[in-house]
Amino acid sequence: MKKLFLALALSVASAAFSQQNLERVEPAFWWKGMKNPELQILVYGKGIANNEISLSDGISIKNIQKVENPNYVFITVNTNEINVPKFRINIKKNGKNLGNYTYELKERNPGSAGRESYTSKDVMYLIMPDRFANGNEKNDSSPDLTEKADRKLPNGRHGGDLQGIINNLDYIQKLGATAIWLTPVNEDNEKVYSYHGYAQTDLYKIDARYGTNEDYKTLSQELNKRNMKLVMDYVTNHWGVSHWMIKDLPSKDWIHWFNDGENGFKRSNYKITSQFDTNASEIDRKYALDGWFDTTMPDINQKNPLVLKYLTQNAIWWIEYAELGGFRVDTYPYNDKEAMAKWAKAITDEYPKFNIVGETWLSTAGHISAWQKDSKTGEAAGYNSNLPSVMDFVLFSEMPKAFQEQESWNKGMIKLYDAFTSDFLYPDTRNLLVFFENHDTERWNEIFNADPAAYKMGLTLISTVRGIPQIYYGSEIGMRGNKEKGGDADIRRDFPGGWKSDKQNAFNLSSQTPEQKEFFQFTQKLLNWRKGKEVIHNGKTKNFVPKDGVFTYFRYNDKESVMVILNNNKKDQTLDLKYFEEALKGFSKGKEIISGKELNLQKGITIPAKTSFIIELEK
């Protein structure tokens, strides 16, 4: 007799379980008091649809839905009509009991619906858990999971885990980050290259090589104690080919299946701009949205109401169970956009303050802005995504050019200015995720040869403009990685000191090299200063057209003003402050926050080459 997978996964002794042909129940439990009282329970077992299904305690079933595969039944109940904390799902045939499952409706934590989420007040720290720190060597490999740990393999499992992150929360907090985004940590039981986590094989279970569901919840709770937040990387577009449900599909239309493809596979053409192309051919749009990312990642069909309900409930389950502080959603525009609008609305209806940022990897602000909630560009296409936040890939793509190009009328720092001139397209610029790298891109310090000056200017920019800054683990100590030569593994190197055998421990500030200290100390000072600056979080912006490789802008509100200067020129520059008179009016001095230097604005400002200034203006 098979063990109940979820009971093991959750390590929760909340449900008495006995069966002959009842193998899975998802979600394993739920909560009373949800705004939407309707609960869909997936019950799985061999031939289970051929049996009689009933609930104990006189509880009525609103709907029993059977699908092509007789191993599945979907039971819908109204939780407002259930007045007991536990009830049994009974499976019978000809009056004989074949199995039952004790289902629990838990009490929600006080204030759960009003939970806080990440905002422009936060700085998000992105971690690839397998490469960060190994806190529990005993779980490096798992007898139940195919790929074993081998740190010698660049694309193999290296052993980083949730406990390693928990052990180093002091480091992250001291750095100044206030939210942590982990790449997916749900089970990914593919044979190879499973460490990235994007080919998930169980949406209700943390991968055993990272720890347990309880470990994940503990991480979130430890962050909450520090007024920090845990952001889950959620994947709606695709699952792993080894997912238990993919192996035994409820129905053929659970995934996008190409009859002329190999085992249903046909690769996406990745042309997701077709989502809003009013003249797009149907074949191009189909290949973009229904095509698979890879042979190991079947494309999920969100148009199927059962699929959409499954994804919605799973997302809400994790928010409630793990006390999450937000989502980042992978490959957002590759999903069915109408279905995802329902998904996002269902979540934010339950949690009005909950933030969700979609990975909107597109090249223009017009296309990206269409994916943000209440967007005028989306409205023009007859669409409202209900998605609170999007990623500013325009700024991301322009930043390296801005700092590398020879200055001219359309090159160099003007690229930054031009990126911000499209802000009118976004309904909420405070809710843009701003970044210069992540786990899929070339590392900033590789592009600029680990030049601290380039890092400082880049970090200054994303930390002081509108939006939510996101940094990538290790950049704060100068970590590099060449994607072109070493592939994804090279931009996802192990953090030095995350393993006992490491020769150097960069988590220990006293053990950092002089080079690492320069990166870290600048990051620490800037991010911790940012924490208390409402003018940066929610203030207005005034940009000035760059001159001589110098980009200057102001963040201001009714109470204060901050002047930011980025000098990308190879020479020192003396600014003509009369040019900025409209923003400097009433201010006579200022303090540069990194150096602590007092500046007399009556005497002008000279800024060294390849340097950034952040000046708190004073009357």
Image (cartoon, rainbow, N blue to C red):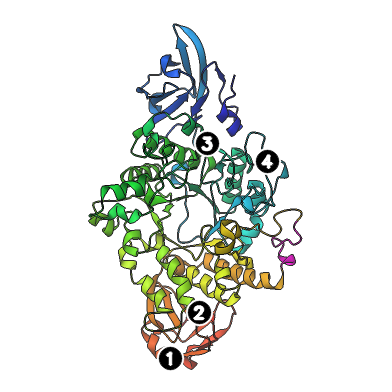
Q: CA distance from mark 1 to mark 4?
A: 62 Å
Q: Residues within 10 Å of mark 4 (few under 14, many from 20)?
A: some
Q: CA distance from mark 3 to mark 4?
A: 18 Å
Q: Disc 1 or disc 2, which is closer to the eye?
A: 1
**Closer-to-camera residue (222/147):** 147
Residue sitting nearer the eye, 310 or 175: 310
- Going by the numbered disc 2, the residue's amino acid type is Ile
Q: Earlier in the sequence, mark 1 or mark 2?
A: 1
Which of discs 1 and 4 lies nearer the camera? The answer is 4
Structural distance between the alpha carbons of marks 1 and 2? 16 Å
2 or 3: mark nearer the eye: 3
Question: Which residue is the extreme one toward the bottom?
Answer: 603
**Within the image, what quadrant is residue 402 found in?**
bottom left
Tell whether label 3 touches label 2 (CB within 8 Å). Answer: no
Q: Classify 401 as above or below 236.
A: below
Q: Tell me which label, 3 or 4, sits earlier in the chain.
A: 4
Tell me the number on the disc at residue 242.
3
Q: Position of residue 95 (x, y in %)?
A: 45, 6
Specify start and end residues of the magenta stretch as a single range: 502-512
Q: CA distance from mark 2 to mark 3?
A: 54 Å
C-alpha separation, residue under disc 4 versus residue under disc 2: 50 Å
Label number found at residue 141: 4
